[in-house]
Image (cartoon, rainbow, N blue to C red):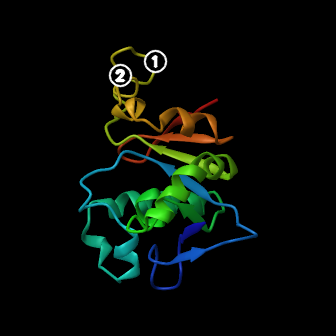
Amino acid sequence: MRLLCCNVGDQPFTTLKEFYTNIPSYAILSHRWGDPKEEISFNDLKNGVDISRKQGYQKLKQCCEKAAKHGLEYVWIDTCCIDKDSSAELSEAINSMFEWYSKSTACYAYLDDVTLETGVADESSSFRNSKWWTRGWTLQELLAPSSVIFYDQSWNEIGTKS
């Protein structure tokens, strides 16, 4: 399992570490992908690309900051922790995803199309109508982790799955 280090010296959010045993506590990000060219990829980190210019950087940065706030040094984010050029690695990741979610300390569900002007209970709220609910992985990401914390588009905490 490859995890992103939340902060390493003067190079925050750019170091990936591979763990085969003794996997440390980590947070995991549940989110919708934006433009693939704007998401932070494994290759971006491997090749030293300036990720701060991509739209996905804020998502990665905020996820790492939430993890650090919760006392975690590592996060797993599908866009950058999987080498999608390797069909074997991609297949292993898909087959391991439920386990990885269930073993996470916390799952951060980032709903990029949600604002809290109407609250979450209102039938017409952006929370209830978020496109996140229509993704193929949503049920797995709700069931597997013991802790799911929902965040709106500004990374304000909405609530938890409980």
Q: Amino acid at mark 1?
A: Ala
**Hey, which quadrant is residue 23 in on the image?**
bottom right
Instruction: Please tell me how crowded label 1 is: few (under 14), some (14-19), or many (20+) other residues with Cα within 10 Å.
Output: few
- Residue 117 screen position, x and y as percent: 34, 28
Q: Quadrant of the C terminus?
A: top right
Number of marks in picture: 2
Q: Is residue 66 above or below residue 131?
A: below
Q: Quadrant of the N terminus?
A: bottom right
In this rendered view, identify the residue nearer to me: 55 or 71: 55
Residue shown at 42%/61% (left/top)? 60
Residue shown at 39%/40% (left/top)? 111
- Residue 88 screen position, x and y as percent: 49, 64
Q: Are marks 2 and 1 in contact (CB under 8 Å)?
A: yes
Query: What secondary structure is marked by label 2?
Result: loop
In this rendered view, identify the residue nearer to me: 162 or 141: 141
User: Is 142 placed left or right of 152 in the picture?
Assistant: right
- Residue 115 screen position, x and y as percent: 34, 34
Residue shown at 50%/62% (left/top)? 65
- Residue 62 screen position, x and y as percent: 44, 58
Label number found at residue 28: none
Q: CA distance from mark 2 to mark 1?
A: 7 Å
Instruction: Please tell me how crowded label 2 is: few (under 14), some (14-19), or many (20+) other residues with Cα within 10 Å.
Output: some
Q: Is residue 70 above or below residue 102?
A: below
* Residue wearing tag 2: 125
Residue shown at 40%/80% (left/top)? 46
User: Is 3 placed left or right of 116 in the picture?
Assistant: right
Q: Residue furthest right?
A: 22
Label number found at residue 121: 1
Q: Amino acid at mark 2?
A: Ser
Query: What secondary structure is marked by label 1?
Result: loop
In this rendered view, identify the residue nearer to me: 130 or 136: 136
**Hey, which quadrant is residue 24 in on the image?**
bottom right
